[in-house]
Image (cartoon, rainbow, N blue to C red):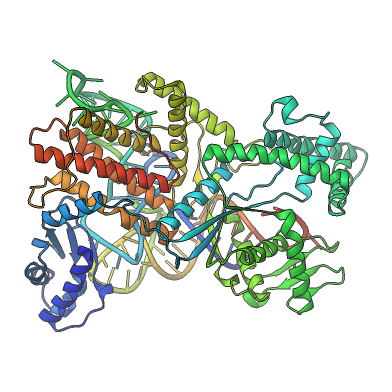
Amino acid sequence: MSIELIIRDQIVEAIEKCYQQQIDSSLIQLQNTRKEFEGDITLVVFPFVRMSKKSPELTAAEIGDYLQQNVTEVEKYNVVKGFLNLVIASEYWVSVLNSVGSTANYGITEPTDSSKLVMVEYSSPNTNKPLHLGHIRNNLLGFSLSEILKANGNKVVKTNIVNDRGIHICKSMYAWKMWGNGETPENTGIKGDHLVGNYYVKFDQEYKKEIATLIEHGQTKEDAEQNAPAMQGAREMLLKWEAKDPETIELWKMMNQWVYTGFDVTYKELGVDFDKIYYESETYLCGKDEVLRGLAEGVFYQKEDSSVWADLTAEGLDQKILLRSDGTSVYMTQDIGTAKERFQDYPIDKMVYVVGNEQNYHFQVLSILLDKLGFEFGKGLHHFSYGMVELPQGKMKSREGTVVDADDLVAGMVEVSRKTSEELGKLEGYTPEQAAETYKMIALGALKYFILKVDPKKSMLFNPEESIDFNGNTGPFIQYTYARIRSVLRKAADRGIAINQTIDSKLQIGKKELELIKAIAQFPVAVKEAGDNYSPALIANYIYELVKEFNQFYHEFPIIIEENADVRNLRLVIAENVGKTIKTGMKLLGIDVPERM
RNA sequence: GUCUCGGUAGCUCAGCUGGAUAGAGCAACGGCCUUCUAAGCCGUAGGUCUUGGGUUCGAAUCCCAACCGGGAUACCA
């Protein structure tokens, strides 16, 4: 039982004894004592003043007396205004430290057979262009969220729905066919997803030229957009694709394969992966069937032009189209099919969609539609809605080339990392491979931490010139602290200092050491809150606080050169456990930590 | 128009289930490497928490309104 729970129970009793009142434990506000005051845990006593009918100070003193007498861990207390600061005996903190040291996966709750199965969908790329910074935020959030849910004792299936069909895919295909001259990733050396993306851009350029020409020849803008040969070609291609025209299918398969090969490289670089991949080309027909079933059952309705609709006015929403007048499916249709298949494939307890907040309406509607179709899981879908990444000049647009490409960004950061590392020269003795691995680890640490430390709900700004930082509240700062701890531990071993993991409970603990033990003790709380709130940012912020605390300690106090052997051992044990906690915490963010840097 | 999310230091962000004097990093300025890694540490300066009301012993935090910004809003995904 944690000290906090014990104190809560005793406060309830104290109120009953002193003021003859039964209180609800939600009235009990405990917080960590602010550093400028003496104490470890603070009770806010204002809510009890009404019961005691005494001043806040007197009330606090009475409760403090009771706790001091009845809770052995409460050594003493002091009162500042309406705040009761409790000083917890250092034996308790020693026992916490000892238990951290003896716990293999400190802070992590392993899943059991009866754990909930959570499916997390993330990434969900289109196969017509390479991944950009927006996708990076999605991928990092999805991966980290999965890790955090696992650490909270859930079973997690990571999934990806690949949007591999549709008019946008046909645009790239058409452009390649028209103007590609047989270019392939092999004969150009261009990464597959980039090559296909180039043709997506090419399509747009040619399309715009054609429109301009048609307008010169007297067509209206609307007509020109419809009649431009490029657009007609792409449409024709989509029809051929749906009709399973062999040549078109062949082209589609070839170009998609280029993209997948490219994506795999990017995913591997980012360190994200999936347990199960769904393809829209395989689920959209199922969605169509479901919509038609809904139509037959009277859940949906059909207009004269034979398009199919859902009426959501009773839910306070609009009408939503589910099948176009030509019978082809829309985004929503596919998501219905994909959802159904997933719940058939897995015993899912919770479905989480990691998708940008521009889709809030979409998922609200999806949930209602699935419910209307009789799927009991419909209401329980969770849209993990995150904010957009913006550039100083505004939103990113693939077609206009105002995107920060994922591969370029990572490569650029690795380059900065390499330069910095070489200047500092701390990797001497590493093989070129080891050094390269470390540069990459640091670069990705910087990128991932930069993105994950921000509250997922909020939109964030990425400034290419300023955001690539390796100092301050950054991933490399945390990685550096870890490497520093490892260095200390290596040196201790070199000097033949054996670390005794079990600290004597009577050992006097210094103030700064105590702060660190308390910080380590907060880790499981941070993991739980991150899980409850679906927020990797809470883990990032926690680690930053811990690391700052450690660096202050490091500068102020000697560790291996401390002469008192007991104190030296205590500091080594603390350093080791801080390192352990950093490593576990960063793992939840998908960030690795280096032994040296 | 309607719905929705946001507005905290020059910049990027914490803090938001109400609690003590609103915190970090970057940028600026000044210190600290012949003791364990200076990608670090310490210090100076920087705030009407958009504005106005309300609830409360207590509001950056909750409620209402206004202003500003992002997003969505029936056949793009």
Residue at the spot 24% in from the left edge and 34% down from the top edge: A489
Q: Where, by quadrant of the figure, is residue A115 drawn?
A: bottom left
Q: Is residue A336 above or below residue A447?
A: below
Foreground residue among A490 and A67: A490
Image spot of residue A392 (x, y percent): 54, 38
Image spot of residue A240 (x, y percent): 88, 50
Q: Which corner quadrant holds the N terminus of chain A?
A: bottom left
Q: Is residue A399 visible?
A: no
Q: Is residue A108 above or below residue A560?
A: below
Q: Is residue B23 left or right of residue A257?
A: left
Q: Is residue A547 above or below residue A471?
A: below
Residue at the spot 86% in from the left edge and 61% down from the top edge: A326
Q: Is residue A359 left or right of residue A483?
A: right
Q: Is residue A270 visible?
A: yes
Foreground residue among A436 and B24: A436
Q: Which corner quadrant holds the C terminus of chain A?
A: top left
Residue at the spot 34% in from the left edge and 29% down from the top edge: A596
Image spot of residue A460 (x, y percent): 49, 46
Residue at the spot 60% in from the left edge and 40% down from the top edge: A132
Q: Where, by quadrant of the figure, is residue A546 drawn?
A: top left
Image spot of residue A128 (x, y percent): 72, 42
